[in-house]
Image (cartoon, grey):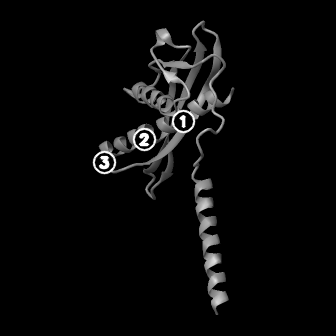
Amino acid sequence: MQKANIRLKEIKKTAIALVVFAALAGCGYHFKGTGLKAPEGVRTIAITMLENRTSESGIETVFTSDLAYEFTRSKVLRVVDKNTADAVLSGRVASLTVDTISHTASYYSDERRVTITLDLALKRADGKVIWSDSALSDKEAFKVDSSRPETEKNRRKAIKDYISKRLAEKIHNRILSDF
């Protein structure tokens, strides 16, 4: 009986360890120092205010702020003023589209998806392009409410809380892993 209890405890410990490992692997957790490296000769970066080619007022500020935060947070490159930077990240919020993805029984929208595309380039101080991508995009679904202001709030939340942050992280990682 004693051996069975010890064996059962070992099985439980192993199962818990496997669950924790699976959870960490599945949630995108990673350890610091995963190979992110600055381009040759670039130690500082400036992030200019993105242009807004959409009808969404203020969207350029949201995306520029999230980009600056992501680079500041990682500390791989120091974010500085454009005049003193080794490289400048600039570009535009190229497009914003909203599509209906589900309907109610009476053909009213129940859920929509907002998609945003960015066009960015990282250039050295001499103007040479180090990295660029003209089709960076991400999308997020949001609920349509019977109240139009509530639907707009849900759409803005999808942009600000999800798309902008994910794209900032994606851009940061692509710039620093391509080298």
Between discs 2 and 3, the one toward the N terminus = 3
Quadrant hosting residue 117: top right
Q: What residue did someone put label 2 on? A: 161
Mark number, residue 147: 3
Residue 128, position as x, y percentages in the image = 64, 10
Residue that protrudes farthest toward the top in the picture: 126
Mark number, residue 3: none
Type of amino acid at the residue the image marks with label 1: Glu
Q: Residue at x 30, y 42 (%)?
A: 149
Between the residue at mark 2 and the residue at mark 1, the CA separation in whole angstroms equals 13 Å
Q: What residue did someone put label 1 on? A: 169
Using a 10 Å C-alpha cutoff, classify the residue at mark 3 as few (fewer than 14 neighbours), some (14 to 19) or many (20 or more).
few
Check disc 3 and report its element: helix, strand or loop. Answer: loop
Using a 10 Å C-alpha cutoff, classify the residue at mark 1 as few (fewer than 14 neighbours), some (14 to 19) or many (20 or more).
some
Q: Is residue 70 or residue 62 the one in the foreground?
A: 70
| Side of 152 relative to 46 (left or right) | left
Residue 59, position as x, y percentages in the image = 41, 28
Asked if residue 154 can be seen in this view, the reply is yes
Residue that protrudes farthest toward the bottom in the picture: 1
Determine whether 143 is above or below 178 in the image. Answer: below
Q: Residue at x 61, y 76 (%)?
A: 12
Using a 10 Å C-alpha cutoff, classify the residue at mark 2 as few (fewer than 14 neighbours), some (14 to 19) or many (20 or more).
some
